[in-house]
Amino acid sequence: MSQLYNKIIELRQQINRHNYNYYVLDNPTVDDQTFDFLLKELEALEEEYKKENPNFDKEFFSLSPTQRVGGEVSKNFTQVEHSFPMLSLANTYSIEEIKDFVKRAEDSLSLKDALQWVCELKYDGVAVSLNYVNGKLQRALTRGDGIRGDDITKNIKTINSIPLELIGEDYPEEFEIRGEVIFPLKEFEKFNNQRIIDEQEPLANPRNAASGSIKLLDSRETAKRHLECFLYFLLLKEDNTNDKINEEILSLTHYQRLQRAKQWGFNIPKFMAICNSIEEITEFINYWDKERFNLDFNIDGIVIKLNDTKLWNVLGATNKTPRWATAYKFKAQREETKLISVEYQVGRTGIVTPVANFEPISLGGTIVKRASLHNEEFIQKLSLAYNDYIYIEKGGEIIPKVVGINFDKREKREGEIEYIKYIKNCPICNTPLIKEESEAGYYCPNYNHCPSQILGRMQHFVSKKAMNIAFLGEERLKYLLDNNLISNFYDIYDLKKEELIGLTSLDEDKKSVIQKKGAENIIEAILLSKDVPFERVLFALGIRYVGEVLAKKIAKTYKSIDNIIGAKKEDLLQIDEVGERIAQSIVSYFSNEENISLINELKKRGLNFEIKETFLSNKLLGKSFVVSGTFETFSRDSIKKAIEDNQGRVLSGISSKLNYLLAGEKMGEEKRKKAEKLNIPIISEKDFIEMLNN
């Protein structure tokens, strides 16, 4: 093997060891910056190796830590049969039923000594099954119907705590390990905060978000969510007598198997206990019923498993559940409190959200005093009235929610019941609200003049993922608006240091003065923001429904703001993820003269409103392509890049305006039929290469 190859192997092992130390041993040995540097170094070495070896082994690179960022977009998920059926656990909410479960097992086995049980946390996530062959991750499946699951290998590879290659050599040739993918609470909160910034409904709980994340078609999007996985169940084939390690592992208890799996690099449960009696099981349950709120992930109960694996087959299973394991479910935490008021918040795009304010309560380890009421329909369905006593629940969810009303207390109240009626006018600017048929709620149409929307858009404009103007937080933006120094985005670029020094809030309770150094920092940050690339400037404009990812796709497709301004609705619909609602929102935004004037003023101040890129040639200028199937020389992404590098355009759907359908292997028959019907030329990878070379 070459020196470069050996260096890649050595660096991979180093990175895998750092991952193991961080995720499994909870003992990081390098800081994040050093780790990122090593990863970039490996990426560069691998690219160099690919150039020197055009016929490189693709499987060799599929196991690299660099692949955790995700890869090509999948069209669907293949269903694969599980090696062992994925049974569910029986659930109970009663300690008495746990006692009965333990007694049934003891009676069935007729043993003199008490049985030993392993208690583990019941993770509130999504079950997955991982198959390893010769120490390498072969396949990852969802539970599915228990017999067959979806192949989610590409997405699972993005989870850092799941080893792509195992440590050491004392593992069986082939085995399966199962666990739970979870969305850590801190990461889930970041994810939801971004959805709120993008005017999207926050997801209610991490479990549903985790389930959706591992089924995303684009594994790069899965990678951004920083999921976690705990592995808690090792399965081996009992008839694999040729593998001595397999035989040895089969002889171990459940607890011992997990400890061995930890040595191979797996992130096994950090909180588990061996219990020798029902009293010890009860103690474990009661401890975690209270302590669960201090974890950075959600659990919804405790799993109790028989430790002696040799007895599992003796006890057997029903059609759905094993008789050697069960689950105790925690009751969802619910508290009663008095409704104080309902207020209506207006977001940066005018969306109005009703919020319940109630007397503070302790819920899930935190003090809660507010909860979203979602929309008018929710309030009516709840039949909410002023001064009601309401039930607030958190359960396995991060976001508190109103789940009911104590009608007994309402009936005992004197006087007339005043039901809550949804407002008809904006609570900020008094503009009549509009409700579109496609929307669940109302919004304020006074886009350019509603103070709440202006402040919200200002906050969005200066945010890190948009223009990244540091030192201009919500309070300072309020100061600037209150003092009439800004009223729109371009005013920010006209600010002078002298205007900022000594500036104070009009709110006496939160008085704050900007000093000279603070003013200099603000001006410097404003100047630096002029270097922000076009896709982020487009995102910063705050067009309704256009989030960070979609802004990149639109910018990449149209190259400049002028092209987007001139785009027709039917053209916008050709972009991936742009539907009727989004296309109409974009057209409406650029049909507004005030918005065009705003863009022209920002242009004058030097912001980037086009992608500044160099092309290899203009050979594909004016030509559009749809790329479908798999290719020998190119990956899907690289063939699209080749089109764009030569000034061609990549479309997502087939229409009469398309110039070429670039067809690889396994292309869908429907696309071929549609192209033939519209007389669109269908070209091969070889035809495309000739087109570039001519």
Image (cartoon, rainbow, N blue to C red):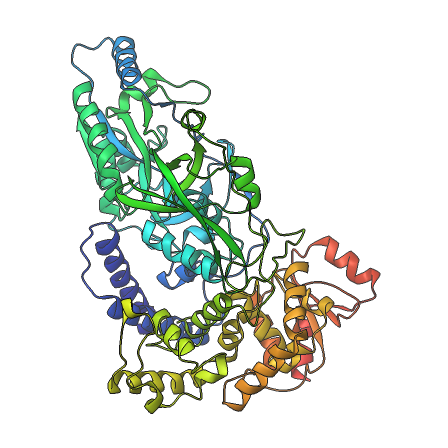
Give residue 171's position: percent from left, percent from top: 28, 43
| 657 relative to 522, above or below | above
Q: Identify whether 618 is placed above or below 308.
A: below
Q: In this view, does 168 lie above or below 277?
A: below
Q: Nearer the viewer, residue 371 or 35?
A: 371
Q: Is residue 130 visible?
A: no
From the viewer's side, name the closer residue of 200 and 285.
200
Image position, residue 47 (x, y; %):
42, 73
Residue extending farthest to the front is: 415
Q: In the rendered view, would you say 191 is above or below 611?
A: above
| Image quadrant assignment for residue 65 | bottom left
Image quarter in which the N terminus is found: bottom left
316 left or right, relative to 116: right
Relative to the observer, which residue lies in front, 675 or 522? 522
From the viewer's perspective, tell me whether residue 131 is left or right of residue 676: left
Q: In this view, does 651 lie to the left or right of 395?
A: right
Q: Taking the image as drawn, is residue 316 in sight? A: yes
Q: Which image quadrant is residue 414 in?
A: top left
Residue at figure coordinates x 34%, y 74% from the top left: 506
Where is residue 423? Give x, y as percent.
Answer: 55, 51
Q: Where is residue 548 in the image (x, y as percent from the top left)?
A: 50, 67
Residue drawn at x 47%, y 35% is: 82
User: Would you identify the image quadrant in which residue 158 lies?
Assistant: bottom left
Give the position of the C terminus as an image quadrant: bottom right
Q: In this figure, what is the number of numbered marks?
A: 0
Residue at the image point whose x is 24% and y is 8% from the top = 110
